């Protein structure tokens, strides 16, 4: 995807998030969005990727590696 800005529909398709949940995320301020014309909302693709990368978890190999480093 080469677009820098996504419409609400594109955001939902890209993330797999339902439209109603997307509205909930915007109204609660959990994801950054833009409203240049006062009605339609747009999302910056970089903001969307940052949002999706929140709360990462380590893989089993990373957990083992970190544990072995702490034991040494």
Image (spheres, helix red, strand yellow):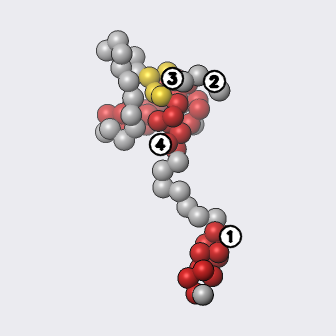
Total marks shown come to 4
Mark 1 in CB contact with mark 4 (< 8 angstroms): no
Q: Earlier in the sequence, mark 4 or mark 3?
A: 3
In the displayed structure, would residue 64 be above or below residue 9? below
Using residue 49 as the reference point, say whether residue 64 is left or right of it: right
Secondary structure state at the residue bearing disc 3: strand
Secondary structure state at the residue bearing disc 1: helix
Of residues 48 and 27, the one drawn nearer to the viewer in this rendering:
48
How many angstroms separate mark 3 from mark 2 (CA)? Answer: 9 Å
Secondary structure state at the residue bearing disc 2: loop
Q: Which mark is residue 51?
A: 4
- Tell me the crowding category of disc 1: few under 14, some 14 to 19, or many 20 or more residues within 10 angstroms, Cα based: few
How many angstroms separate mark 1 from mark 3 (CA)? Answer: 36 Å
Q: Nearer the viewer, mark 2 or mark 4?
A: 2
Q: Earlier in the sequence, mark 1 or mark 3?
A: 3
Q: On the rendered image, what quadrant is the C terminus found in? A: bottom right
Residue depicted at x 59% and y 32%: 14
Residue depicted at x 53% and y 39%: 49
How many angstroms separate mark 2 from mark 4 (CA)? Answer: 18 Å
Which residue position holds label 3? 5
Residue depicted at x 58% and y 87%: 71
Which residue position holds label 1? 61
How many angstroms separate mark 1 from mark 4 (CA)? Answer: 25 Å
Extreme right residue here? Answer: 61
Q: Which mark is residue 2?
A: 2
Of residues 1 and 26, the one drawn nearer to the viewer in this rendering:
1
Residue depicted at x 54% and y 24%: 4
Answer whether residue 18 is visible to the viewer in this image: no
């Amino acid at each position: 995807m080469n677009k820098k800005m996504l419409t609400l529909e594109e955001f939902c398709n890209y993330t797999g998030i339902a439209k109603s949940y997307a509205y909930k995320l915007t109204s609660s301020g959990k994801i950054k969005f833009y409203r240049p014309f006062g009605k339609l909302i747009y999302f910056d693709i970089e903001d969307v990727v940052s949002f999706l990368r929140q709360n990462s978890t380590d893989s089993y190999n990373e957990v083992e590696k970190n544990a072995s480093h702490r034991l040494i």
